[in-house]
Amino acid sequence: METPAEIRNRWRYLRDLLLEQLGRFEEGTLQLHADGVDVSASAIAKLKRNIQDFDELIARSEAREEG
């Protein structure tokens, strides 16, 4: 089983990868083709908010571990 630190490291890697791809999509250098999947600007914004929410959850978890 992974330790909390390993889980955080994995999340940070995946987070950075996703944010990079979302940025490329917004810039137009990455195109998504989807059958009925919402890839609108609002969907991208929601993904970014969810990433931020998860980052905050991890930060609170880290604070509890340190405290």
Image: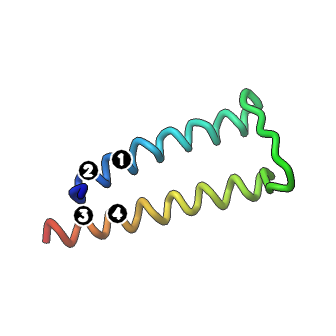
Residue corresponding to mark 2: 6
Looking at this rendering, what residue extends furthest in the front direction?
1
For marks 2 and 4, the one nearer the N-term is 2
Which residue is at 39% across, 68% downward? 57
Vertical order, 50 against 12 (above or below)? below
Residue 46 quadrant: bottom right
> Which amino acid, mark 3?
Glu
The crowd level at tag 3 (other Cα within 10 Å; few <14, some 14-19, many 20+) is some
Residue 10 as seen in the image, left or right of residue 40:
left
Q: Nearer the viewer, mark 4 or mark 1?
A: 1
Q: Which mark is residue 58?
A: 4
How many angstroms separate mark 4 from mark 3 (CA)?
6 Å
Task: Give me the C-alpha separation between circle 2 and circle 4.
Answer: 12 Å
Q: Label 1 sits on what residue type?
A: Arg
* Circle count: 4
**Which amino acid is tagged 4?**
Ile
Label 2 Cα neighbours within 10 Å, binned few <14 / some 14-19 / many ≥20: few
**Crowding near pointer 1: few (<14 within 10 Å), some, many (20+)?**
few
First-in-chain label (2 vs 3): 2
| Residue 2, horizontal then vertical, whole percent | 24, 55
Q: Residue at x 49, y 65 (%)?
A: 53
Verify CB contact (< 8 Å) between mark 2 and mark 1: yes
Residue that appears at 34% across and 63% down? 58
Residue 50 position within the rendered picture, expressed as x and y whole percent measured from the top left: 56, 62
In the rendering, at what x and y percent does residue 29 appear? 73, 27
Secondary element under disc 4, as helix, strand or loop, is: helix
In 3D space, how far apart are the residues under numbered discs 2 and 3 (Cα atoms)? 12 Å
Residue 40 in percent (x, y) is at 80, 52
Q: Secondary structure at mark 3?
A: helix
Labels 3, 1: front one: 1
